[in-house]
Image (cartoon, rainbow, N blue to C red):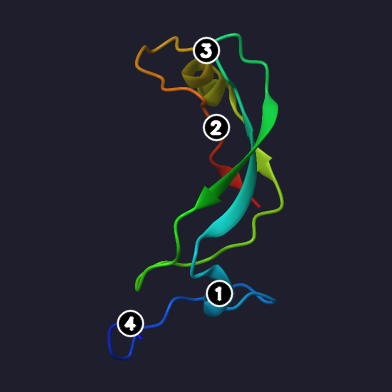
């Protein structure tokens, strides 16, 4: 229901679209401010859309560029900041 004909979001093993209709519970390591002290935060992602892919991520690398963003060295960082883009 509500999906484009012939399209369906891919869902990781063990999850079903019906269990994620109200959103997806998530946890991330975030910096609450420019001090760059990582802390876990819990939040809810929006429900999957017609063209979304659900990936169960296990690990994320944080490189030096991510730390510049987290410390607001480039200005404009919004907090809490969840840096990292090297996913596994």
The residue under the point 28% across, 83% down is 4
List the single residue furthest toward the left. Answer: 4
Q: Give whichever of discs 4 and 3 has the lower sequence position.
A: 4
Q: Give whichever of discs 4 and 2 has the lower sequence position.
A: 4
C-alpha span from label 1 to label 3: 34 Å
Q: Which residue is mark 3?
A: 71
The residue under the point 41% across, 19% down is 77
Q: Which residue is mark 2?
A: 82
- Give the numbered dot on residue 11: 1
> Are the residues flagged by discs 2 and 1 in contact, CB closer than 8 Å?
no
Q: Give whichever of discs 2 and 3 has the lower sequence position.
A: 3
- Crowding at mark 2 (Cα within 10 Å: few <14, some 14-19, many 20+): many
Pick the front one: 63 or 23: 23
Q: Secondary structure at mark 3?
A: loop
Q: Quick check: 60 above or below 37?
A: below
Q: Give whichever of discs 4 and 1 has the lower sequence position.
A: 4
Residue 71: image location, x then y, percent: 52, 12
Pick the front one: 56 or 33: 33
Q: Which residue is mark 4?
A: 3
List the single residue furthest toward the bottom. Answer: 6
* Left or right, 29 with reference to 69: right
The residue under the point 50% across, 76% down is 10
> Are the residues flagged by discs 1 and 3 in contact, CB closer than 8 Å?
no
- Crowding at mark 3 (Cα within 10 Å: few <14, some 14-19, many 20+): some
- Crowding at mark 1 (Cα within 10 Å: few <14, some 14-19, many 20+): some
Residue 42: image location, x then y, percent: 64, 41
Q: Secondary structure at mark 2?
A: loop
Residue 3: quadrant of the picture: bottom left
């Amino acid at each position: 229901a509500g999906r484009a004909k012939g399209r369906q979001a891919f869902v990781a093993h063990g999850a079903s679209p019906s269990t994620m209709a109200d959103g997806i519970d998530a946890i991330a390591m975030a910096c609450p401010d420019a001090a760059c002290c990582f802390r876990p935060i819990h939040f809810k992602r929006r429900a999957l859309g017609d063209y979304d892919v659900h990936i169960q991520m296990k690990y994320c690398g944080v490189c030096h560029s991510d730390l510049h963003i987290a410390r607001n060295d480039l200005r404009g960082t919004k907090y809490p900041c969840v840096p990292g883009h090297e996913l596994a």
